[in-house]
Image: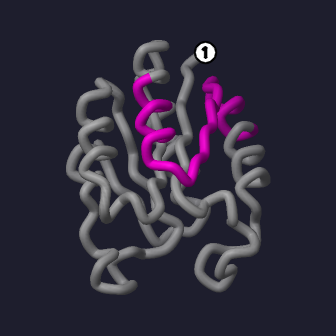
Amino acid sequence: MKKIAVINGANLDRLGVREPEIYGEETLEELVLSLSSEAEKLGAEIVHFQSNHEGAIIDKIAELADAGVRLAIINPGAFTHTSVALRDSIAGSGMKFVEVHISNIHRREEFRHTSLTAPVCAAQICGMGREGYFAALRYLAAL
């Protein structure tokens, strides 16, 4: 069965309570359960990881790559705009990533318009709410 990692970064553990007008009312746990159900229908399995710590995410990407996982959805949260280390981890992993953002980062504050990680990802999806995760999942499962 194809394994697809779903990696969520800073503050995504607060989905459902943090700025629901921007991020919605669904919790991260609910989102991951829905993704897992959809993945099963597509013949894939979700491996989920969330951390508010940049180094933990970098360590997890290396662990997944070493375990042979080749496909991933990543929502780095604020690390998108700040982390050269995360960008380098993605680039050096040998994995195909789709970067996802619940909100449209290009319609928000100026500092959110630049993604350091998107240039080393196969695609970027933003502004589709939770549906962005499902679009990324369908894309990766079809590969």
- Residue at 77% x, 44% y is 33
Q: Is residue 126 magenta?
A: no
Q: Quadrant of residue 55?
A: top left
What amino acid is at disc 1? Answer: Met
Q: Is residue 111 left or right of residue 34?
A: left
Query: Looking at the picture, how far across and down is residue 28, in whole percent?
Result: 71, 56
From what the image shows, is residue 68 above or below residue 21? Answer: above
Q: Residues within 10 Å of mark 1 (few under 14, many from 20)?
A: few
Tell me where the magenta segment starts and ends, as one range.
37-62
The foreground one among 57 and 90 is: 57
In the picture, which quadrant includes the N terminus? top right
Q: Is residue 30 left or right of residue 139?
A: right
Query: Looking at the picture, how far across and down is residue 111, in whole percent?
Result: 29, 79
Element carrying mark 1:
loop
Q: Quadrant of residue 109?
A: bottom left
The foreground one among 89 and 42 is: 89
From what the image shows, is residue 47 above or below residue 78? Answer: above
- Residue at 74% x, 70% y is 16
In the picture, which quadrant includes the C terminus? top left
From what the image shows, is residue 109 above or below residue 50? Answer: below
Query: Looking at the picture, how far across and down is residue 52, in whole percent?
Result: 56, 54
The foreground one among 40 and 13 is: 13
Residue located beneath label 1 in the image = 1
Query: Looking at the picture, how far across and down is residue 9, in whole percent?
Result: 52, 53
The structure's colour scheme is one colour
The foreground one among 19 and 139 is: 19
Q: Is residue 54 magenta?
A: yes
- Residue at 48% x, 23% y is 64
So how many labels did they put on this image? 1
